[in-house]
Image: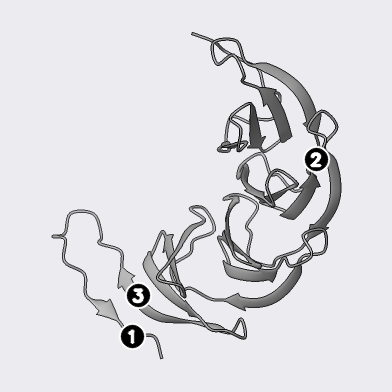
Amino acid sequence: MAKVDTGVLSHPGAGHSALSADGQLLFVAGGLGLAVLDVSNPRAPKKVAYVNTTVGSHAGGNHVVLHNTLAYIDIAGGLGLAVIDVRNPLQPTLLTTVNTGVLAHNSGGHAYVVGPHLLVAGGLGLCILDIAEPAKPKVLRKVNTGVATHDGGLGVAFGMDKFAFCAGGFGLSVVEMYEDAAAEAVAVVEAVPMGTAVGSVPVEVK
């Protein structure tokens, strides 16, 4: 079994990885930064590069999502969002960082690309950013999902062209997105307390 010291993963926080389109490179994000690994031989992965994202937290770790066919990596960490140019994966370059206002230090974040938008979910809610210019993300809107917790963070998935499904410590929130990037929570499925029967009812958010 191959074991590699990435140098970016912290004990309290979680790590996350993304594979390049050609399957030759693996990008590993953690509380200590971003590592690039050559996995052309999966039995002997090699670390080939490292960059300090400046946004990772030891407790929360990082989340990485590829964007623009290996041109950029958007990293959501406990201290903000970092955009890293990896057109030359042997020399990744930190381009900019953005304070999304939704990431908690002790829970990290989760990122999801939807067309020209990036959804960043964290312990303080959901942030929608314009990434039409990948090197210059712009915060468009922040949404209080009603289900995020500082310690547990928030996960997000997107479907049916306009709905973001946000899972947090207090349950599942459905956020509807509109053409002008406006968004609002339209339903919440409350988390089931331990020891109770499953069967929560969707509740409309006024």
Name which residue type carries label 1. Glu
For the residue marked with disc 3, what is the amino acid? Val
- Secondary structure at badge 3 equals strand
Residue at screen point 79% across, 29% down: 50
For this view, does 116 lie left or right of residue 15? right
Q: Earlier in the sequence, mark 3 or mark 1?
A: 3
Q: Looking at the picture, how far across and down is residue 105, in whole percent?
A: 65, 52
Q: Is the residue under label 2 in contact with that under label 3 (CB below 8 Å)?
A: no
Mark 3 = which residue? 188
- Up-down: is 69 above or below 38? below
Q: Earlier in the sequence, mark 3 or mark 2?
A: 2
Residue at position x 48%, y 53% in the image: 152
Task: Name, please, the residue furthest toward the left.
Answer: 197
Which amino acid is tagged 2? Answer: Arg
Q: Secondary structure at mark 1?
A: loop
Please state which of the two labelled residues, at mark 2 or mark 1, is closer to the viewer.
2
Q: Is 81 or 199 nearer to us in this picture?
A: 81
The residue sitting at 35% across, 75% down in the picture is 188
Circle 2 packing at 10 Å, graded few (<14), some (14-19), many (20+), is some
Tag 2 residue: 87
State the separation of the CA atoms marked 3 and 2. 40 Å
**Mark 3 neighbour density, 10 Å: few (under 14) some (14–19) many (20 or more):** many
Lower position in the chain sequence, tag 2 or tag 1: 2
Vertical position of residue 1 compared to residue 199: above or below: above
Identify residue for label 1.
204
**Relative to 101, residue 15 above or below:** above
Q: Nearer the viewer, residue 162 or 9?
A: 162
Label 3 to label 1, Cα distance in Å? Answer: 7 Å
Residue at coordinates 45% horizontally, 72% vertically from top-left? 161
Secondary structure category for the residue under label 2: loop
**Residue 158, image x, y percentages:** 46, 64
